[in-house]
Amino acid sequence: MSKNIKIMMVEDHPEYREIVEMMINRQPDMELLSQFGTAERGLRSLQDTPSSVADILLLDLNLPGMNGLEAIPHFTKERAKTKIIVLTQSDQEEDVLKAIMLGASGYLLKSSTVKQLTDGIRMVASGGASLDANVAKFVMHTLKAKLPRQILEQMLTEREIQTLALLADGLVKKEIAKKLKISVSTVVTHVSNIYEKLAVKNAPSAIAKAFRLGILSLDD
């Protein structure tokens, strides 16, 4: 299998970088392109090598100099197509919510197992979103309904809401089509309509905004 998931890592602890590097090198479909101890060095590298594009950025929050939350918009500006997974020790609600609102596609704790980390990377690389199980519940509660339900239901059709919920579960378009017993092209149309109605550009942003507005909730 070709190593089709290209990964960049920004982490200031050399020992943990070695652990993650070893984990990635053992995966047949992953390749660690680069690693840096500060966000500034990572951003400088991207500016110096514009042709280098990683699929995934593993980003710590507690970094010397520019911290991870401050760095997310800068990395997004430099590489819009690179999806960011926060990989940190912090399970503070404020950090989690800020990271998601800034555009992170995943939030995983350093206490995660190898399987949880690699599954999370694959899920985000395939267009899904990944939250550590220890933080997912309060995230969903916090991002719950803030608008009247009847208004929310007017924003998206029932089928679009079903499609969005399956995206939130980490399913890709082909799997959603099978689950809903519709064609892949119809799923593509639903997803396109969802992005347009929510004024977002990708699935993670749509999912985050849907929870924030109350279109999706923990009970869905």
Image: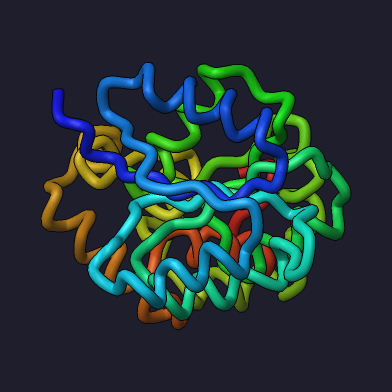
- Does 160 sit above or below residue 1? below
- Does 93 sit above or below residue 47? above
Q: Quadrant of the C terminus?
A: top right
- Does 15 sit above or below residue 68? above
Q: Is residue 194 visible?
A: no
Tell me where residue 213 sits by quadrant: bottom right
Q: Is residue 73 left or right of residue 173?
A: right
| Image position, residue 156 (x, y; %) | 44, 70
Q: Is residue 190 visible?
A: yes
**How is the protein colored in the picture?**
rainbow
Residue for point 79% across, 38% down: 89
| Image position, residue 198 (x, y; %) | 47, 77
| Image position, residue 132 (x, y; %) | 67, 35
Tell me where residue 52 sits by quadrant: bottom left
Residue for point 51% across, 56% down: 84
Q: Is residue 135 left or right of residue 167?
A: right
Which of 150 and 60 lies nearest the eye of the viewer?
60
Q: Is residue 179 left or right of residue 136?
A: left
| Image position, residue 25 (x, y; %) | 38, 23
Residue for point 72% across, 49% down: 140
Q: Quadrant of the N terminus?
A: top left
Residue for point 48% across, 21% down: 22
Which of 179 and 41 lies nearest the eye of the viewer?
41
